[in-house]
């Protein structure tokens, strides 16, 4: 069966934000690339995978993340140090997890989690 769209467009996460400029800046600071920006919408990418931001100024963020976006990276400790230097709000500190990843989660300005992770070789084989 042939896919209707490319694998990079097949599954895209779109999240709501209160301020498109603030949220776009946050994700760009983490290393996402800006693909397209409009007045109330932005399209970003990480390794060719897409993330959409949709501005709704009346949005009320949750107290804990309703979900999170996992980003696999070669060196999670380097990203962790960068997030600490930027003083980003940490939801879950860096740790080796039972499921074979070393990861951590920071909160975006609207309460969505961004989890960075690296595989732990001894636990994933």
Image (spheres, helix red, strand yellow):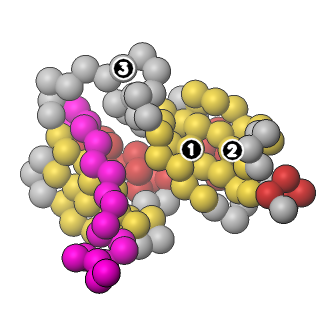
Which portion, as a residue range, is magenta?
Answer: 1-19
Which quadrant of the view contains residue 58?
Answer: top left
Helix, strand or loop at mark 1: strand
| Numbered circle sitting on residue 103 | 2
The answer to whether mark 1 and mark 2 are in CB contact below 8 A is yes
Percent of width and height locating residue 43: 26, 60
In the depicted structure, whether residue 99 falls above or below residue 12 = above
Percent of width and height locating residue 63: 42, 16
From this viewpoint, is residue 33 visible?
no
Depth check: give the residue in front, 116 or 98: 98
Instruction: Compare marks 3 and 2 and give the one earlier in the sequence.
Output: 3
Helix, strand or loop at mark 3: loop
Percent of width and height locating residue 86: 56, 41
Which residue position is annotated with label 3? 62
**Quadrant of the image containing the C terminus:** bottom right
Helix, strand or loop at mark 2: strand
| Numbered circle sitting on residue 74 | none
Which residue position is annotated with label 1? 115
Q: Is residue 86 left or right of residue 69?
A: right
Q: Is residue 104 left or right of residue 59?
A: right
């Amino acid at each position: 069966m042939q896919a209707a769209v490319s694998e990079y467009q097949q599954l895209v996460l779109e999240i709501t934000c209160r301020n498109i400029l603030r949220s776009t800046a946050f994700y760009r600071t983490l290393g996402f690339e800006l693909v397209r920006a409009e007045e109330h919408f932005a399209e970003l990418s990480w390794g060719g995978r897409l993330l959409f931001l949709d501005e709704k100024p009346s949005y009320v963020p949750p107290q804990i993340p309703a979900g999170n976006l996992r980003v696999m990276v070669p060196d999670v400790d380097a990203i962790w140090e960068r997030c600490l230097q930027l003083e980003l709000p940490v939801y879950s500190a860096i740790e080796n997890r039972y499921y074979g990843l070393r990861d951590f989660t920071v909160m975006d300005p609207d309460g969505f989690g961004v989890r960075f992770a690296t595989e732990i070789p001894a636990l994933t084989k």
